[in-house]
Image (tube, rainbow, N blue to C red):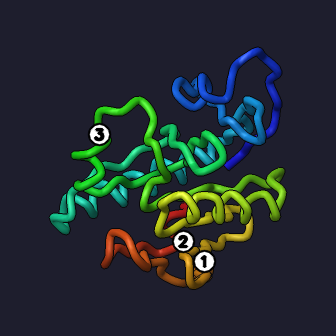
Amino acid sequence: MVTTAVVSENFSGEDCMLNLPEHMEWVDGQLREKNGMTLQHSEIQINLGFYWKSYTISSGQEGKVYTDVPCRTNKQGRRPDVAYLTPELVAQFGKADILPQSFPLIAEIVSPTDIAEDVFLKAQEYLQSGCEEVWLVFPESRLVLVITQSQIVGFTASEVVSTQKVLLGFSVAVNELLA
């Protein structure tokens, strides 16, 4: 997830939402830089993107998987670490520069410097903006939380995490994901 530095520049909110700069999010009326990416964070991001993409192909569910791609929530301009777009939404928005809603399935990889309350508020923000399922990946504690509108399910290092609403049937061992 990793969002810290605030960048004060003269951009309107609408400008930022339409042309969100690389490695930036539009949060609480300000551009904020997403930084603090570590090797571990990047590896987990690519692992999960690869697993989701492979599953879309092998299961025939299709769709597209993205990393660090801009989307608009009801309040902000965000860049989820990993996101899945269904075939129906690809047909509707696949050529857009920024998705005008949250992706149906989103993963955020939590860094040691992230504030817990902010991480959960971001997950709620996604869910209130069209997302059906958010994965919060905690590399240090080797834990994955899968959050939907109606539940939070936790998976530990020795367990197999699975989707709850989107990409049904997908699962991966937490240890494998975090390897």
Residue 81 image point, x, y percent: 55, 48
Residue designated by label 3: 94
Residue 139 or 100: which is nearer the viewer?
Answer: 100
Q: Residue at x 77, y 41 (%)?
A: 28
The answer to whether marks 2 and 1 mark residues whose Cβ atoms lie closer than 8 Å is yes
Residue designated by label 2: 175
Amino acid type, mark 3: Gly
Residue 73 image point, x, y percent: 57, 49
> Is disc 3 placed on a helix, strand or loop?
loop
Residue 123 falls in which quadrant of the image? bottom right
Mark sitting earlier along the chain (3/1): 3
Amino acid type, mark 1: Ala
Mark sitting earlier along the chain (2/1): 1
Q: Residue at x 65, y 31 (%)?
A: 24
> Is disc 1 placed on a helix, strand or loop?
loop
Q: Is residue 30 above or below residue 133?
A: above
